[in-house]
């Protein structure tokens, strides 16, 4: 047995199954020192590959980070890893929890890792492996840029294990990762661990039965269902023409009827996806009202024990406000709802019970399809269309794949079932087409945020920043050539830096030695050439390599100095440092008779009569200038570098570095000419930040430093409000209420109610904030940037009441669900903590800390605490 096979056997010793071929491919890549992108269906075993990478970090005596897109998934993964490695070796770092943060294995949200990178956290110094779970979040409009920031900014020595849902362009993503970070292998597994059977359910009015038919027969839409639907359409056409037509055959089965079908076909436990929170609640309540019980007496006892243990942090009043009695009745019957409108404690209870097989059916919104491991025997999709806020839209193939990924439990079910319920707005042919589709192309959603921009200014030069932006997946997909050039620039820049380091002499200035004594035309010091051109003034006669010339004008451009020179042969040339081998050396000065010159920058306005220029050329010739001879050997030998025993080697290294830098100039010019989609947006963002006083001459102002520490979707508006004092002189409760205007967003289709303010001071401050927001939105729109979301005062009264100790029951209504309330409060706490850490006014920092304490209580505190025993 080879050492490498012994190591692999040791890393896999805890598993009681043989790895699948795709897992072995990923192990091979990691053992070979490569990063890996694993694109495979849900439940196929991607986690085993992630843990293999973490084992490698531990064996190397270094650290491994596991990142997830949402806190719930981070919490679950933390508990999973604690079960494998013990609580002493695993830590957790999210916005809510910081547990054992110095552990060798640290679980966190991806945003936390991004913030650590910008803060240059010492924790990154011993980092060996980073697992990026759910990396297909790259295409998420809000969270996507964070993934790319992490991938681009992590040190190249850190190995990536990127886990993704099945995507059709995995090879392209892996090629991008290879270009940006080094060798990355794409490992694609299209085969599900449990076979998926696509089913279609409809009611047949001719028999009054609920029909459960296969969607596909021999890889084609089921002809029997097509025939039934054709009859339905014929009836509709006859009815529209006023005729009787044949009787309508299809109707949508009720959810209770569907549960009977699932139970009769042994398809429980099931997840029933409904794209409406209210309908999820109503469906669970309807099942309870009907007397449906799916659990045994023993199971109900176990459910009560788990539920009681999970709600110990909630008061009786809070439980009553949350409808705890009805919730208990439902879960004890084996039925539950699951959506973002529920408090996290209730959602976590549902997850724990379902994973134990105690809850048999969960009516859930699509948020359940993201992250948490909750497989079922069957998945039901209530409708193949969902309301986007403006119109109904048929599910995409990627969304269908995500939802049905939960169907089939590995090691339990031989087949998983995905059941689509008939509705009149999406044809069966469309459903079959989505089921057949295997296309899920991952596209970048990268964009420059204000916080990202100032952090790039803070940590990188303009050239480095443009280079990093051009490494983004967005730029790669828009113009793959630019990314490839930028990657070559990175490699060649490192080579040039290495050679410059080799050329360094401890005896003296090697560049001075080369300028004075080395006459090889292949050797050049661009910096020295640029400096020599900067010193020239109109009228100077100088040597430009081997030719004397008269300087007519100088100008400073973005890429350096440009000098207009007249030579003795009457040739006029505009020279830059790129066109010279050696630094220009001034010999004398001539009066520019007949040439008019402005009083600043030595710029030529008019060169005058050509006869004047001809006379000036004659003067150059008549000077009979001679090139200064090379210094005598004695002077060369007296230079400190002459004593360096490795002088010849160092001169060769310097010459090679010059050659590479000439190549770099050419590569950068190619990159500049290419379409810089991302960089152009960055330029627009920087221009706006300069107008608002956050950046000056590529330096952050105090406002810019503040912005670099604000992580929020309205980061610039928050920073402007803090910097301009809008948060100052507010008591803790008023401060919490005011900050809520940044995090709250009214989402109902109905017109929002009028905001109420507990004080004229708060009303006045909000009016000022609205004014700042509108000015900023106008500037963003005129700059071609997407305007930020306007502040919303709809939660000011709610936060005020809660911070004053109000009861939860008094705050919940049709527009305020328990889950929305808790989520908004947790977002408020996160932003208040940022204010407490970075506000320039000490009193504001203290008030923000006190505001956190007033908000962090009751159901909010319970939701911010690690669940007992996790979610397993």
Image (tube, rainbow, N blue to C red):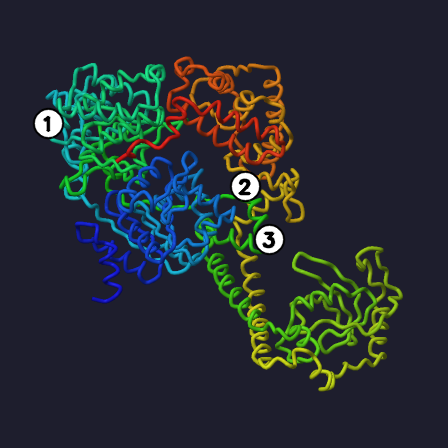
Give the residue displayed 61% in from the left and 36% down from the top.
Answer: 782
- Sequence-wise, the earlier of marks 2 and 3 is 2
Residue 451 is tagged as 2
Q: Quadrant of the C terminus?
A: top left
Q: Residue at x 15, y 24 (%)?
A: 295
Depth check, front residue: 295 or 337: 295
Q: Position of residue 811 (x, y in %)?
A: 42, 15
State left or right for residue 716 relative to residue 552. left
State which tag comes first along the sequence, 1 or 3: 1
Q: Residues within 10 Å of mark 1 (few under 14, many from 20)?
A: few
| Cα gap from disc 2 to disc 3, whole angstroms | 16 Å
- Which quarter of the image is occupied by the N terminus? bottom left
**Which residue, given by chain and number where applicable, does mark 3 sit on?**
462
**Sooner in the amino-acid sequence: mark 2 or mark 1:** 1
What is the number of the mark on residue 264? 1
Residue 819 spot, x, y in % from top left: 37, 24
Tell me if residue 139 comes above or below residue 26 in the rendering.
above
Dividing the picture into quarters, in which one does residue 79 lie? top left
Residue at the spot 35% in from the left edge and 39% down from the top edge: 74
Q: Is residue 106 above or below residue 493?
A: above
The one of 726 and 437 positioned closer to us in this rendering: 726
Q: Position of residue 841 (x, y in %)?
A: 63, 31
**The one of 1 and 145 positioned closer to us in this rendering:** 1
Callout 1 secondary element: helix
């Amino acid at each position: 047995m080879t050492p490498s096979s012994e190591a692999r056997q040791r890393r896999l010793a805890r598993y009681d199954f043989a790895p699948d071929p795709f897992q072995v491919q990923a192990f091979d890549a990691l053992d070979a020192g490569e990063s890996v992108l694993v694109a495979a269906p849900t439940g196929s075993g991607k986690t085993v590959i992630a843990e293999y990478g973490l084992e490698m970090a531990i064996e190397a005596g270094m650290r491994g980070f596991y990142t997830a897109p949402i806190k719930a998934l981070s919490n679950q993964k933390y508990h999973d890893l604690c079960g494998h490695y013990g609580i002493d070796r695993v830590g957790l770092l999210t916005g809510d929890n910081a547990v054992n943060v110095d552990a060798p294995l640290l679980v966190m949200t991806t945003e936390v890792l991004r913030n650590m990178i910008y803060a240059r956290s010492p924790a990154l110094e011993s980092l060996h492996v980073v697992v990026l779970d759910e990396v297909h979040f790259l295409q998420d409009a809000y969270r996507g840029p964070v993934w790319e920031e992490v991938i681009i900014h992590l040190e190249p020595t850190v190995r990536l294990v990127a886990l993704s849902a099945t995507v059709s362009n995995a090879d392209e993503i892996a090629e991008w990762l290879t270009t940006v970070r080094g060798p990355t292998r794409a490992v694609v597994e299209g085969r599900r661990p449990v076979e998926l059977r696509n089913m279609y359910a409809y009611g047949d009015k001719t028999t009054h039965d609920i029909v459960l038919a296969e969607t596909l027969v021999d890889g084609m839409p089921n002809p029997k269902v097509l025939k039934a639907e054709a009859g339905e359409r014929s009836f509709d056409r006859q009815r529209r023409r006023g005729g009787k037509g044949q009787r309508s055959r299809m109707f949508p089965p009720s959810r209770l009827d569907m549960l009977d079908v699932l139970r009769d076909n042994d398809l429980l436990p099931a997840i029933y996806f409904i794209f409406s929170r209210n309908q999820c609640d109503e469906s669970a309540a309807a099942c309870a009202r009907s007397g449906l019980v799916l659990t045994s007496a023993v199971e109900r006892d176990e459910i009560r024990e788990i539920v009681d243990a999970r709600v110990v942090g909630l008061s009786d009043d809070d439980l009553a406000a949350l409808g705890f009695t009805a919730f208990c009745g439902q879960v004890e019957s084996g039925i539950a709802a699951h959506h973002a409108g529920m408090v996290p404690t209730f959602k976590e209870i549902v997850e724990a019970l379902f994973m134990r097989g105690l809850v048999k059916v969960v009516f859930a919104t699509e948020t359940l399809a993201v992250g948490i491991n909750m497989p079922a025997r069957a998945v039901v999709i209530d409708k193949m269309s969902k309301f986007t806020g403006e119109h109904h839209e048929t599910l995409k193939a990627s969304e269908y794949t995500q939802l049905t990924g939960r169907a089939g439990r590995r090691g339990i079910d031989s087949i998983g079932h995905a059941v689509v319920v008939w509705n009149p707005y999406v044809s069966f042919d469309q459903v079959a087409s989505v089921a057949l589709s295997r296309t899920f192309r991952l596209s970048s959603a990268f964009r420059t945020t204000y916080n990202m921009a100032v952090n790039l200014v803070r940590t990188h030069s303009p050239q480095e920043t443009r280079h990093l932006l051009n490494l983004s997946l967005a730029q790669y997909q828009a113009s793959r050539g630019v990314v490839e050039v930028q990657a070559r620039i990175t490699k060649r820049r490192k080579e040039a830096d290495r050679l410059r380091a080799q050329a360094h002499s401890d005896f003296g200035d090697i560049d001075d030695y080369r300028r004075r004594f080395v006459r090889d035309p292949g050797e050049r010091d661009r910096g020295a050439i640029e400096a020599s051109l900067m010193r020239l003034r109109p009228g100077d006669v100088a040597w430009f390599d081997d030719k004397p010339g008269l300087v007519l004008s100088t100008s400073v451009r973005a890429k350096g100095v440009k000098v207009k020179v007249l030579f003795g042969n009457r040739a006029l040339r505009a020279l830059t440092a790129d066109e010279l081998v050696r630094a220009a050396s001034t010999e004398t000065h001539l009066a520019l008779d007949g040439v008019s010159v402005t009083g600043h920058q030595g710029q030529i306005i008019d060169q005058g009569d050509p006869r004047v220029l001809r006379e000036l050329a004659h003067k150059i010739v008549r000077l009979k200038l001679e090139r200064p001879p090379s210094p005598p050997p004695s002077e060369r030998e007296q230079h400190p570098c002459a004593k360096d025993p490795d002088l010849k080697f160092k001169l060769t290294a310097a010459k090679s570095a010059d050659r590479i830098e000439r190549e770099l100039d050419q590569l950068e010019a190619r990159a500049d000419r290419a379409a810089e989609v991302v960089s152009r947006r960055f330029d627009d963002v920087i221009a706006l930040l300069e107008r608002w006083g956050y950046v000056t001459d590529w330096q952050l102002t105090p406002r810019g430093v503040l912005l670099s520490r604000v992580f929020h979707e309205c980061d610039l508006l928050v920073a402007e409000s803090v910097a301009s004092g809008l948060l100052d002189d507010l008591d803790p409760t008023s401060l919490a209420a005011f900050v809520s205007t940044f995090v709250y967003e009214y989402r109902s289709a109905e017109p929002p109610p009028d905001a109420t303010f507990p004080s004229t001071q708060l009303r006045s401050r909000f009016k000022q904030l609205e004014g700042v927001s509108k000015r900023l939105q106008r500037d963003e729109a005129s700059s071609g940037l997407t305007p930020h979301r306007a502040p919303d005062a709809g939660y000011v009264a709610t936060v005020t009441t809660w911070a004053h100790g109000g009861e939860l029951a008094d705050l919940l209504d049709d527009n305020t669900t328990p889950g929305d309330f808790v989520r908004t409060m947790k977002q408020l706490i996160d932003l208040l903590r940022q204010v407490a850490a970075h506000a320039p006014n000490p009193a504001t920092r203290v008030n923000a800390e006190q505001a956190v304490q007033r908000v962090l209580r009751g159901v909010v505190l319970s939701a911010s605490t690690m669940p007992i025993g996790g979610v397993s």
